[in-house]
Amino acid sequence: MRAVYDKETDTLTMRLSNAQIVESDEDKPGIIIDYDSQGNIVGLEILDASRRVTDPALMEFSVSVGAS
């Protein structure tokens, strides 16, 4: 997974997979979801990110692994 904030365009882009994007839909104004050929979500773009996210340049990730 990769997340990039472009301050110049004020866009937060998250790639969840390296699969090729074959379709993109603007789910809500300014929220674009990218799909692969199987219909799986592979990416997400947030336009005007500084208005929608508290601080798009500051990202914190955590990974939780459930018990098997």
Image (cartoon, grey):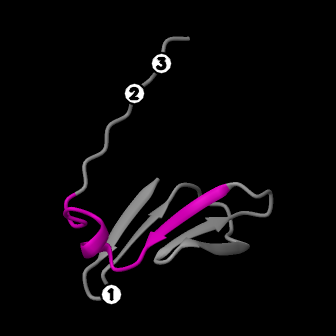
Q: Quadrant of the C terminus?
A: top right
Of marks 3 and 1, which one's residue comes earlier in the chain? 1
Residue 52 lies within the magenta run: yes
Image coordinates of residue 57 in percent, x first then y, are 21, 66
x 33%, y 80%: residue: 48
Residue, far bottom: 8
User: Quick one: 33 or 20, which is closer to the camera?
Assistant: 33
| Local SS, label 3 | loop
Circle 2 residue: 64
Q: Are marks 3 and 1 in contact (CB under 8 Å)?
A: no
> What residue is rendered at 65% in x and 74% in y?
24
Residue visible at 80% across and 57% down in the picture:
38
Contact check, label 2 and label 3, Cβ < 8 Å: yes
Secondary structure type for disc 1: loop
Looking at this view, is 26 or 12 the one in front? 26
Q: Amino acid at mark 2?
A: Ser
Residue 47 place in picture, x, y as percent = 40, 78
Would residue 30 be found to the left or right of residue 21 on screen? left
Q: Quadrant of residue 56?
A: bottom left
Mark 1–mark 2 distance (CA, rounded to whole Å): 32 Å
- The image quarter in which residue 22 lies: bottom right
Pick out the residue farthest to the front. Answer: 28
Task: Determine whether 16 is above or below 36 in the image.
Answer: above
Q: Amino acid at mark 1?
A: Thr
- The span from disc 3 to disc 1 (Cα, nearest Å) is 37 Å
Residue at the spot of label 3: 66
- Residue 40: x and y in percent read 70, 54
- Residue tagged by mark 1? 9
Tell me the CA gap for discs 2 and 3. 6 Å
